[in-house]
Every structure is written in structure tokens, then in C-alpha cells.
Image: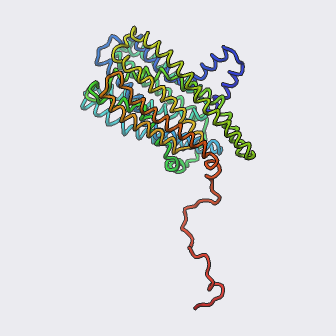
Amino acid sequence: MAGIGVKLNSIFEKQSIAADLVGFAYSTAVTVAPMFVVILNILLMGHVLGFDEVGYMEREMFSCTILYTFIFSLLTTSPFNAVLSKYMQDVIYEERYQDILPCFYLGLVMNLGLSCLVGAPFCLWEHFVGGVEVHYVFTGFCAFISLVMVFYSMIYLSICKDYQRISIYFLLGMIEAFLLSLVLRFLCHWSIGFSMLFALMTGFFLTAILEFATIKRYFRQNSNRYKPVLRYFTRWWQLIVTNFFYILGLYIHNFVFWTSDMRMVLVKSFVCNQPYDMATCLAMFTNISATILFIARVEMHFHEKYKAYSEAVIGGKGVDIENAKRRMFRQLVSELMTLVRIQFIISVVVYLVCTVMLPQLGFAGLIMRIYPSLAVGYFILFLMYAAILFLYYFNDMAGSVMTTCAFCAVTLVGSMIATRLPDIWYGVGLIAGTFTGWTVAYLRIHWVEKHLASHIFCRGILLKQENVPAPSSKVYDKYALTGERQ
């Protein structure tokens, strides 16, 4: 997200309170605004259409459908998007813009193919076993596929540094969804739940179409070179593992609690754990500002030191390289510690507000007993994510794989143990997993610092590598020169 830094520097250089507020608002708009727009639209539709007055079954069907749509659209896109993003970055660096559309088309087919393999059997089960009507099942499936297309297209606009346009497209899609829900409910007299689901599906689809049209406008030429894209999946398989296990780790503790005695099974298809899932959502929002703070500070401060080190490597003396390296890692540690301090203050304030205000809004009892431990877990989670991004900066794929695998595995085991503990400790599995992942990532960054010289200067090759038959092992034959034989 290197394009954010230029804009933020131009905002914060004014050094005023108003500039700070504008900078924070801009950072929010280009990072988490799409998620907030969707959530706000759902809440607004529910309030205007009277969602709280509908029956329990209809309300839970809609909630579970939206929950599954978001979770599994992220999971099915996670194995591909990191590699495709890497390929596109390299193509743009080499100015081979005609190779971007083949990457986009191939990645779209792969994403939709895996999503259909996951979603279609579930929808068939939902209809034939759960007895849900065809039109409701099909609408939910279309919402799932549309959201997959939205998440997939976002990576291309992000690499093109068109972050504002992503937020605008989400806003337009949700405005259309809100207006359509009113038409479907009050003019067509559809049910409230189905009106909201159908409207959200069209909003996601409109967002995906707008993103697709923008990509087509940016990149018009098509080289039809698809094999290089496929080769990237074998070359950068670590990115597949890292991204998939990170996304899986975000939800694996929820999956574990979906199998506990607290679970709720709806129409023999949807499984959820309402108190734990709601506490998870609250804990995530308590610490979501860490993403904004990290991106803003890294793009404004660390990226400059990283660029200075890269320039020193290209044309500087040994002492210049070493000095630039020390300054870069001092800045890295400073950014991590600053993120910890600022986010800790924000999380404590938000936590106190939640504990005071949420019980008055109906969020009390078991939800508020689970919430504290999960809030701690997500606090460490966003710190771990920051460390993973620093590993990406140094191209340490092995370190990122170890981090996410440790995070996911410990979270799984810890959550299985936590199901047998008192409810106040239900989030201890997430805490253990994120702390393990953070520790691995931080130790790996320290290892990279000690071995950065060999990592930078000893990874290249002098001879061109080719896949051809090996030459003969004979290097000298004295009889070939003299013609003599014994």
C-alpha cells in the first residue's frame, strides 16, 4: 500500500489537529471503510424494515446466511489471492501490463471454481435436507459468489493504489441494496428477511461489476500468457500456505465452538454459536483500529527507511549499507512498540465503553463474559499481523509460513481445551495461538536482522538456469589429443 504514504505525508505535514483528524479519516476510508459500510447498511435495513419484529426462524436464517457468506468467501479466496497479487506486482514492475488480464481471468476462474465446489454441495444439502426453498438458497449462493468476486477484484485495485475507489464502489453497492430492499418490501411485499438478502446480493454484484469495469479500463491489452501465472503457484507456494492458514486461524476457534454443546443447528445445515460469535465480532471491532494505525505509520515512517536501505544496497558503500540497516530495524521496532502502546490505550477505552454501554443495548450475560478474553486475543492478533507484513517486506516466506502455521495449530488445540473451561476463559485458545504466532514472527524478524546481508547478497545466481540434459562428466581425455592407446 505504498501509495497511501504519499497522501498521508501530504496531510500530516500541516501539523495541526484538523490535519490529524483528516489523516485518520483517510486511513480509515482506505482500509476498513468497506466493512463498516456493509455492517451499517445491514443495521439500517433491519431498522427501517422492522427486522427485529420477524419470527425467530427467519431472523436466524438471514443471520447465518450472511455469516457463512462472509467467512467462506474469505476462506475460498485466500489460497489464490496472495500469489496472484505477487505476480501482478512483478508484472507491473517489469512493465508487462499486457500480462495482467491473463492473470485476472485465470485467477477469477480458479476462485470461482473452488467457491462453487464448496458452496454448491452445501446449497444442495440446505435445500434437499434442510428443506429451505429454492429461491432463498439460490439467492444466498449468488450472494456468496458475488462477494467472492468482490474480494478477488479488490486485490487488483489495491495494487493499482485505487483505494478510494474501492470504498466508493462499496458505498454505491450498499446504497443500491438499501433502496432495493425498500422497494422489495413495501412495493413488492416480499418477506423482510428475503428482501434484505436479495438486496445485499445485488449490492455485492454491483460492487463486483464496478470493480471489474475499472480493471478492464486500466488494462486493455491481453497477451494470453497463462502458463507464467500457473508457474507462480509452484514458485511461491509459501504465500498460499501463509494466507490460507492466517485466514483459517481467524475463524478456526469459532469452528471449534460450533461443535460444542452451545452450538445451534438451523435447518440441519447452518451451525453457529451465537454468544461466542457475537463476542468475537465485538472483540474484533475493539482492536480494528490497529490496522489503520499500522498502515498509516508504516507508510509514513518505515517505508522511507526501507527505501533508503534498498538504495544503499544498490549503490552505497559497506558502511552506508550497515548504517541504513540499523536505522531501518530501529524504526521497525519503534513502529511495533508504538503500535502496542497506542492500540492498548484505544482497546482499553473501547473495552470500558463496551462494558458500560452494551448491556443497556441487550448484549449482556454470556456474551460479555466471553468478550474480555477474546478482546485480548484480537489485540495480539493484529500485532502478529503487523509482524507478518514486516516479514513480507524482507521476503522471508519461511518465517511467514512458520508464523501462520503455529498460530493456526495452537489456536485449534487451545480452543479445543477452552471448550472444557469456564466461559470466561473461552478465548484462551485464541490468546495462546496469537501469542505463539507473535513470538515466532518476532524471533524470525530478529533472525532476519542477523542474516540480512546473506539474505540480500547471497540469493542470486551467476549462470542462467535451464532444464536441459546434463553434459558428460568427462572433462579431459589425453588420448583424444595424442591418438595413442595402451
Q: Quadrant of residue 92?
A: top right
- Residue 39, position as x, y percentages in the image: 45, 19
Quadrant where the N terminus sits is top right
In this rendering, the answer to whether 393 lies above or below 138 is: below
Q: Is residue 266 visible?
A: no
Q: How many marks?
A: 0
Q: Residue at horizontal 61%, vertical 42%?
A: 449
**Front residue of 420 and 484:** 420
Left or right? Give the position of 27 relative to 126: right
Q: Quadrant of the C terminus?
A: bottom right
User: Relative to 440, is 187 on the left or the right?
Assistant: left
**Nearest the camera: 11 or 370?**
370
| Residue 88 place in picture, x, y as percent | 58, 41
Colouring used for the render: rainbow
- Residue 138 vertical placement versus 36 (above, below): below
Asked whether residue 154 appears in the rendered view, the answer is yes
Residue at position x 29%, y 14% from top? 55
x then y, percent, for residue 450: 60, 44
Q: Is residue 99 left or right of residue 326?
A: left
Residue 158 x %, y %: 57, 32
Place residue 69 in its image quadrant: top left
Which residue does the image show at 59% across and 59% down from the upper left? 465
